[in-house]
Image (cartoon, rainbow, N blue to C red):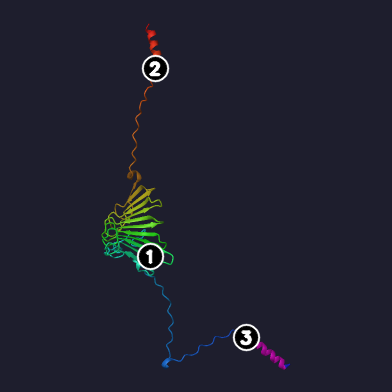
Amino acid sequence: MVVRATLSMLFVASLALAQEPAAAPAPAPTEPANGVAPAAAPTPAPAVVQAATVVAKPAEAPAGTAGTRPSAATNPPIKPGESRCTEASQPGLVVEANTSNGETFAAVRRVLRITADKRTLVCREFDRNHDGRYDSVRHYDAKGEASFEEIDTDHDGRIDLWLFFQSGKVGEEQRDTNLDGEADETVTFNELGQISRVRRDRNFDGKIDEWEIYTNGTLERRGLDDAFEGRVTRWDRDAELVPPEPTAAPEEKKEEPKEEPPASKKKGNAKAKAKAKK
């Protein structure tokens, strides 16, 4: 009986040990190099998240993104042969440029993203007057659709016209009318390509002081900031802006010619008059 009780107690104890989780083995002590114990690892400081400074790229946020106004600082004049397609510096892109007729610089330059089955245009620049400076640069989105275009209309090396596309059409146009490197006029178009709004900086101080509102492409009203305080001080309505359409002069009534009686009736009338005389 004593032996059975002892065996039972040993069996229960073994089951209890089997159910307990095994303790993780202690790491083997490492022998210090050159007899010098290594310094204890410092406790890591809590991570500090800093806001990253985003550098605008023409493919994402050009100098003059739709709704903003380009400035002279972001619109420097370029030199002959200098590219405006800054996307070319991005990895994985291919530049195609071909010269002809003894040109030093290619008149057309393309930046492409090439995969196994597709060639996607990223940027295209064109030297229209062949003076070595690219005066028309169009940028494309990830789908290869036109995103915006920069144009140097007077060929002085500085952009003075910005076009922004929506669904393949120009949705906004910005112009530098006094050629100081900054846009001072913005024209917005609707889905039909009609002008819907115009904003101008008349005194070139960097603030909008004239607003034009259009309906179906027709000027409806104009707001002016005559005091240049950043707010509309006077509204001109359509009746004062849009001259009335000329009305057509009333047509003169023409008298219809009288119908001549037939010859037989004339003879009968003549006989009747002759009898009356008798």
**Residue highlighted by disc 3:** 18
| Local SS, label 3 | helix
Q: Which residue occupies the foreground of this view, 189 or 84?
A: 84
Q: Which residue is mark 1?
A: 112
In the rendered structure, which amino acid carries the disc numbered 1?
Leu
Which residue occupies 33% across, 44% down?
A: 240
- Name the residue: 62% across, 85% down: 18
Q: Is residue 53 left or right of residue 31?
A: left
Where is residue 6? Give x, y as percent. Answer: 69, 92
In the depicted structure, whether residue 42 falls above or below residue 169: below
Quarter the N terminus occupies:
bottom right
Labelled pair 2, 1 in contact (Cβ < 8 Å): no
Asked whether 277 or 58 is in front, the reply is 277
Q: Mark 2 highlights which residue?
A: 263
Q: Which residues are magenta?
A: 2-16
- Circles 3 and 2, Cβ within 8 Å, touching? The answer is no
Q: Is residue 213 above or below residue 267?
A: below
Residue type, label 3: Ala
Ranked by sequence position, the earlier of labels 2 and 1 is 1
Q: Residues within 10 Å of mark 2 (few under 14, many from 20)?
A: few
